[in-house]
Amino acid sequence: MTSRRDCALGVCFASAVLGAAACSGAADSRRGQMPLETPTASRTCITFPAELRPEPSREFLALWDQAAKEYHLGDFAEARTTYDRLRSERPDLPGPWRYLASLAWDEGRWWDCAVAASIALYLGPVSSHRPALESMQRECYQEQRMLNVTRLLAEAADASGSDCDAMATRFDRIIADEHLEGVMSKPSSPVRPMRPLRSSSPNEIAVVGKRLADAVEQCKDSAPLQAVLGKLR
């Protein structure tokens, strides 16, 4: 039972507000960057500092293997439950948090992904997986922020109804408040700390993006709205 995001949020955002081609297809998985492995005392991910981390128990290793199998089979709900057990049993290890972050990525739970990746980085500052985790953390923060902004724009469009001038005014205020001018031309640029509105669900990107796209389409001939949307480019 596999749940995956339908597309990269940045593409959905562009499609919704700028009229770009609709996004489709499965997202890249980060599992290839962070291969599953059995934790041992010799692994970098659990040996910092080595003298403070005891050998994993036999039960822990068996549970780790179970989680790995569930993850590879796409049983994400079961894998998440098992990695949560591993995290509870060994709160000093970054490994369970690393895979909780990857699971959240696969399911489009951006805020959960960013938090789990941050904890994994804190627990394993010299891990060989650090570059991949840092990249995932940045992207999840960015995806969550863009989802927040898309929600705000969709809510503003709903509040405006068929009044395109009111929609343009509300959009202009959001773009200014969120510092979004030129955001689509530099999607990978650093962003200021975001304020999460609420956690995302796997299908929310497509749903919110479609709401926004439909609203913008109704006002496609509005010069004020098109001028405001041009600020995003």
Image (tube, grey):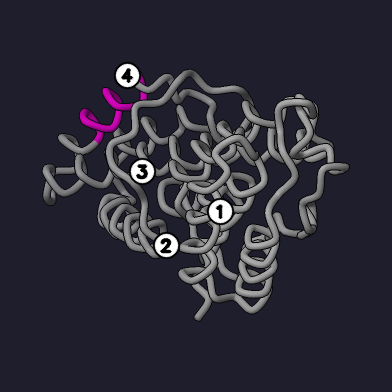
- Left/right placement of residue 77 relative to residue 57 reads left
Whether the residues at callouts 4 and 2 have beta carbons within 8 Å, the answer is no
Residue type of the residue flagged with mark 3: Thr
Q: Nearer the viewer, mark 1 or mark 3?
A: 1
Label whose residue precedes the other's in the sequence (4 or 2): 4
The image shows residue 181, relative to residue 73, as above or below, that is above
Q: Nearer the viewer, mark 1 or mark 2?
A: 1
Element at badge 4?
helix
- The dot on residue 150 is 3
Write the residue at 20% across / 44% down.
Answer: 155
What segment carries the magenta color?
A: 168-177
Using the numbered discs, state the Cα–Cα distance from disc 1 to disc 3 in whole angstroms: 35 Å
Write the residue at 70% across / 49% down.
Answer: 56
Write the residue at 36% across / 58% down.
Answer: 201
Q: Nearer the viewer, mark 2 or mark 3?
A: 2
Name the residue tied to disc 4: 177
Residue type of the residue flagged with mark 1: Leu
Element at badge 2?
loop
Using the numbered discs, state the Cα–Cα distance from disc 2 to disc 3 in whole angstroms: 15 Å
Residue type of the residue flagged with mark 4: Asp
Residue 94 point in image, percent of width and height: 65, 39
Name the residue tied to disc 2: 202
